[in-house]
Image: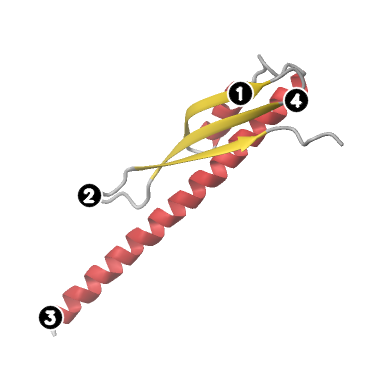
Amino acid sequence: MAGTAVLLVAATAMTICLVGWLGSIRRAAQVADLAALAGARAQVATGRLRAGPGCAVAAATARANHAEMTSCSVDATEVDFVMAVTVRVEARPRVQIPQAPRFVYRTARAGPAAQR
């Protein structure tokens, strides 16, 4: 009986950790999308596709959503650009399991819609 209780507690704890980590992955993807879109909008709004404020706006957006931007790049031509943003989010729940991830990284890309 005691062995069954221990297994039930261990299975419950692992399920909570797994659900938390999956939620962190989803949150990181959402923050990366939001930051990339905010940065792309800032690039378009200024009209400076190569040297616009996109990365600064993307970083501020990531910070406002409790994430850290780890990289930002703008691949620009004279008429178009693509912004790529990578963010880092702390994995939840915070547990001390060996080899458990502490952070989740996700990358998103954004740019203006193609003109037709």
What type is the residue that disc 3 sits on?
Answer: Ala
Where does label 2 land, which residue? Answer: 96
Question: What residue is rendered at 87% in x and 36% in y?
Answer: 116
Judged from the image, the secondary structure of the residue bearing numbered disc 3 is helix
**Mark 4 and mark 3: span between their CA atoms?**
63 Å
Question: What residue is rendered at 48% in x and 27% in y?
Answer: 71
Judged from the image, the secondary structure of the residue bearing numbered disc 2 is loop
Asked if disc 4 and disc 3 are in contact, CB closer than 8 Å, the reply is no
**Mark 2 and mark 3: span between their CA atoms?**
24 Å
Q: Which mark is residue 2?
A: 3
Asked if disc 3 and disc 1 are in contact, CB closer than 8 Å, the reply is no
Tell me residue 72's x, y (percent).
Answer: 53, 26
Q: Which mark is residue 44?
A: 4
81 with respect to 29 (left or right): right
Mark 4 or mark 3: whose residue is earlier in sequence: 3
When asked about the image quadrant of residue 61, the answer is top right
What type is the residue that disc 1 sits on?
Answer: Val
Q: Which mark is residue 90?
A: none
What type is the residue that disc 4 sits on?
Answer: Val
Where 68 falls versus 78 (above or below)? below
42 with respect to 23 (left or right): right
Residue at the far left in the pictured view: 2
83 with respect to 88 (left or right): right
Judged from the image, the secondary structure of the residue bearing numbered disc 1 is strand
Where 100 falls versus 50 (above or below)? below
**Mark 4 and mark 1: span between their CA atoms?**
12 Å
When asked about the image quadrant of residue 13, the answer is bottom left
Mark 2 or mark 1: whose residue is earlier in sequence: 1
